Amino acid sequence: MGAPSNECQRNNLPDWQETWIYSPTTANLTDMTEPASRETFSTPSNLDGRTALVTGSTSGIGRAVADNLAARGAHVIVSGRDAGRGTSAVTLIRERGGSADFLGADLTTRTGTAGLAERALGVTGQIDILINNAGVFSFGPTSATTEAGFDATFAINVKAPYFLVQALAPAMAERGSGAVVNILTGAAHRGSVAAGLYGSSKAALLLLTQGWAAEFGPCGVRVNAVSPGPIRTEGTDDGAGLESVAAALPARRLGNPREVAAAVAFLAGDEAAYIHGAVLPVDGGAIAA
Ligand SMILES: NC(=O)c1ccc[n+]([C@@H]2O[C@H](COP(=O)([O-])OP(=O)(O)OC[C@H]3O[C@@H](n4cnc5c(N)ncnc54)[C@H](OP(=O)(O)O)[C@@H]3O)[C@@H](O)[C@H]2O)c1
């Protein structure tokens, strides 16, 4: 078999891992499986100097992700259609000592997606972390689905992540490092009444997560996903039945956006350096319910 066409120039290990694995003091298996001291494992989640684009970060889960990444030192591009909410998210990050800018974008169209990628690169020079979070919930019976509703769901939940990855991942691959985290949902993993359209759009994103992990992983770009359970956000505020779903989970409660954000930040950072193509459920234990 010939060499893959996207063969990489170098095998980029994050600094902390170089120290941990290849330090001359790591003489035995114990040393290789556990950091020898706090010093050698000091900043695994430090995102200083990295830039992150978080779609749909004017509210809910995306906003919590933007806050978390900024708190870890990343320069964050907050994005969404609502300039008022976007600006207040940026203001709060800056007041807390973080670094962020807002870029308005409607991700329903290919032009909107391409424009966001281009402007984000214009502001930051490069994007190291892409969080594909913007999404629409489209619940209802198949018989009531309109073509416009179908197209809008797939445009935001699938097409926008697809073309953002197309626009940003090749440059990450060229640099030999980068991270993409896609936001899924429990409805992507099993069929249920009224969630066919929404679930199938997120199932497509699940498949893309694995495909992109295979495609870009050899060049140092890790692609993973977080699959949230019922989370109270602006988007689910009027979601009847969210509490009853939560009541049946081992956790016996709704999740909050910060809990999802912590998982996203983990997958985006160097602690997750050996994790590719994984889906991390943050769902109160739905798998065991
Ligand atoms: N909350 C939950 O229970 C739950 C569970 C599983 C998965 N999820 C997933 O988590 C993600 C975030 O959900 P959330 O609950 O945080 O929802 P949310 O509060 O409604 O936030 C959705 C975000 O997406 C942005 N957005 C929507 N349409 C857009 C468009 N056409 N162009 C650009 N941005 C757009 C919104 O920004 P603007 O309004 O400013 O445009 C907003 O920032 C979604 O992908 C959702 O499927 C949520």
Image (cartoon, helix red, strand yellow):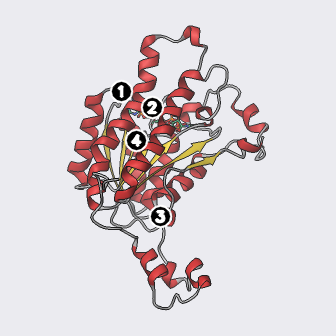
Contact check, label 2 and label 3, Cβ < 8 Å: no
Q: CA distance from mark 3 to mark 4?
A: 23 Å
Which residue is at a point 41% across and 19% down the rendered structure image? 151
Q: CA distance from mark 1 to mark 4?
A: 12 Å
Q: CA distance from mark 4 to mark 2?
A: 11 Å
| Mark 3 residue crowding within 10 angstroms, few (<14) / some (14–19) / many (20+) | some
Mark 2 secondary-structure assignment: helix
* Residue on which disc 3 sits: 273
Q: Nearer the viewer, residue 260 or 232?
A: 260
Which mark, by number, is residue 157? 2
Q: Quadrant of residue 197?
A: top right
Q: Amino acid at mark 2?
A: Asn
- Mark 4 or mark 2, whichever is nearer to me: 2
Q: Is mark 2 within 8 Å of ligand 1?
A: yes
Is residue 16 positioned above or below 49 on the image? below
Q: Amino acid at mark 4?
A: Thr
Q: Is mark 4 within 8 Å of ligand 1?
A: yes
Mark 4 secondary-structure assignment: loop
- Work out whether mark 2 precedes mark 1 in sequence or the reverse, and give the earlier one: 1
Contact check, label 2 and label 1, Cβ < 8 Å: no
Q: CA distance from mark 2 to mark 3?
A: 26 Å
Q: Quadrant of residue 2?
A: bottom left
| Mark 2 residue crowding within 10 angstroms, few (<14) / some (14–19) / many (20+) | many
* Residue on which disc 4 sits: 55
Q: Is mark 3 within 8 Å of ligand 1?
A: no
- Mark 2 or mark 3, whichever is nearer to me: 3
Looking at the picture, how far across and down is residue 106, in whole percent? 33, 30
Q: CA distance from mark 2 to mark 1?
A: 9 Å
| Mark 4 residue crowding within 10 angstroms, few (<14) / some (14–19) / many (20+) | many
- Work out whether mark 1 precedes mark 4 in sequence or the reverse, and give the earlier one: 4
Mark 1 secondary-structure assignment: loop
